[in-house]
């Protein structure tokens, strides 16, 4: 009960949701980097060959019906022993890819669950303070007033540079990029009753990126699972699954064959598109890492009566912040209190609360 012991922490230890989102985004950047490499190899190998062959765009519509006519004879054209070996080799490769994709889905999916719980936590009453350290407690007393049992935390910092970095991804009441204000006079502002998303503002872009990436991974998983089932079907003596699969793709055979035979693909366009995505994600990672680079923030957890929060802070900051310049030094602070323990626990999934 009451105010916990003061902890001096870097932003990275506080904004745990933003810190946790970076590895998920890095998974996506690694995939994009691999795509650029593969596209570069493909353009190097295919385009000179296409130019030498001088292959014009082909009308291959007639091949669909022709393939359908000859499909019934397909089993007799393939030796079962060769087919089993082929299916095993392809299946092993698909299993490896499927394992990597499934692991990525687990990582990104679990991260998104935690982020969404934290962002949806509501009833987080928040106040922003600027002024002398010794005046924080009395100002909180006047602002919070009465109320029942609450849980929450207080963040305070003398370094405006570190406070500015925190403000890049957390709603401190200070606009990102703001110049240092005059902190000789105490001021406190109610930011209202917020949810997690309104407090941890830096998670909106990572959340969008990770949601889109998870959808793509699930699409890849479905395709690989289908391919794995298809290669398993190759081992059936009557090849019925192979015939069924080929029959199913016949309506799309024109498009498929044109892709292989027309050489109309321009890989430089694809590379530029992937490069643009990669540049955006690398820039986002850089911004997030910058926001986490601040240090020297004082953190207190609080549990008790709302109207006793200020008195507890008055005692704790009578001599200024721990290791700082004294009671008259200008500081910035944020106070977050919540009457719902479950909401505070959910918010704790994306930001340190205890």
Image: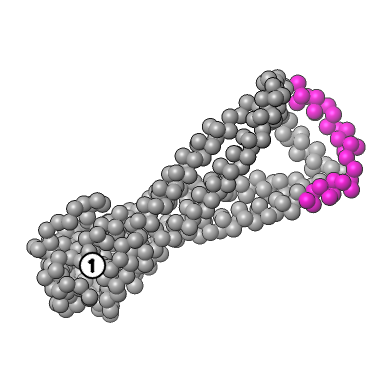
Percent from the top left, x then y, of residue 15?
A: 36, 62
* Residue 167 position (above or below residue 311): above
Residue 80 appears in which quarter of the rendering?
top right
> Residue at coordinates 61% horizontally, 29% vertically from top-left?
265
> Residue at coordinates 56% horizontally, 55% vertically from top-left?
105
> Residue at coordinates 79% horizontally, 43% vertically from top-left?
241
Residue 104 appears in which quarter of the rendering?
bottom right
Q: Which of the pair 7/61 is nearer the observer?
A: 7
Percent from the top left, x then y, of residue 215?
A: 53, 47
> Residue at coordinates 83% horizontally, 32% vertically from top-left?
71
Percent from the top left, x then y, of residue 176?
A: 26, 52
Query: Left or right of 193: which side holds 108?
Result: right
Does the magenta-highlighted stretch encompass residue 332? no
What quarter of the picture does the N terminus occupy? bottom left
Local SS, label 1: strand
Give the colour scheme of this rendering. one colour
What quarter of the picture does the C terminus occupy? bottom left
User: Is residue 5 in sight in this rendering?
Assistant: yes
Q: Which of the pair 113/26 is nearer the observer?
A: 26
The magenta segment is: 62-89
Q: Which of the pair 204/35 is nearer the observer?
A: 35
Does the magenta-highlighted stretch encompass residue 77? yes
Query: Left or right of 107: which side holds 64?
Result: right
Q: Which residue is mark 1?
A: 156
Query: Left or right of 93: which side holds 293?
Result: left
């Amino acid at each position: 009960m009451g105010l916990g012991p003061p902890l001096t922490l870097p932003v990275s230890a506080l904004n745990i949701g933003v810190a946790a989102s970076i590895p998920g985004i890095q998974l996506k950047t690694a995939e994009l980097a691999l795509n650029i490499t593969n596209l570069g190899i493909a353009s190097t190998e295919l385009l000179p060959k296409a130019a030498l062959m001088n292959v014009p765009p082909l009308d291959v519509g007639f091949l669909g019906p022709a393939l359908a006519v000859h499909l019934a004879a397909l089993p007799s054209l393939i030796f079962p022993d060769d087919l089993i070996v082929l299916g095993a080799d392809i299946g092993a490769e698909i299993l490896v890819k499927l394992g990597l994709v499934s692991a990525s889905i687990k990582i990104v999916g679990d991260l998104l669950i935690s982020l969404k719980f934290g962002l949806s936590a509501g009833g987080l009453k928040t106040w922003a303070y600027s002024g002398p350290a010794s005046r924080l407690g009395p100002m909180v007393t006047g602002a919070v007033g009465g109320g029942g049992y609450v849980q929450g935390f207080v963040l305070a910092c003398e370094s405006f540079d570190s406070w500015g970095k925190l403000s890049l991804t957390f709603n401190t009441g200070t606009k990102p990029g703001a110049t240092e204000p005059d902190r000789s006079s105490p001021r406190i502002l109610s930011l209202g009753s917020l949810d997690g998303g309104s407090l941890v503002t830096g998670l909106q872009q990572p959340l969008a990126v990770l949601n889109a990436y998870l959808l793509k991974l699930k699409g890849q998983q479905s395709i690989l699972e289908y391919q794995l089932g298809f290669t398993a079907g190759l081992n059936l003596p009557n090849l019925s699954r192979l015939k069924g699969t080929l029959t199913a793709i016949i309506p799309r055979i024109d498009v498929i064959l044109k892709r292989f035979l027309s050489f109309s693909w321009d890989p430089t366009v694809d590379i530029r598109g992937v490069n643009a995505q990669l540049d955006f994600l690398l820039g986002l990672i850089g911004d997030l890492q910058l926001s986490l680079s601040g240090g020297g923030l004082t953190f207190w957890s609080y549990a008790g009566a709302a109207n006793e929060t200020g008195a507890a802070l008055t005692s704790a900051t009578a001599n200024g912040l721990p290791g700082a310049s004294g009671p008259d030094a200008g500081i910035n602070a944020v106070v977050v209190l919540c009457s719902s323990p479950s909401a505070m626990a959910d918010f704790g999934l994306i930001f340190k609360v205890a």
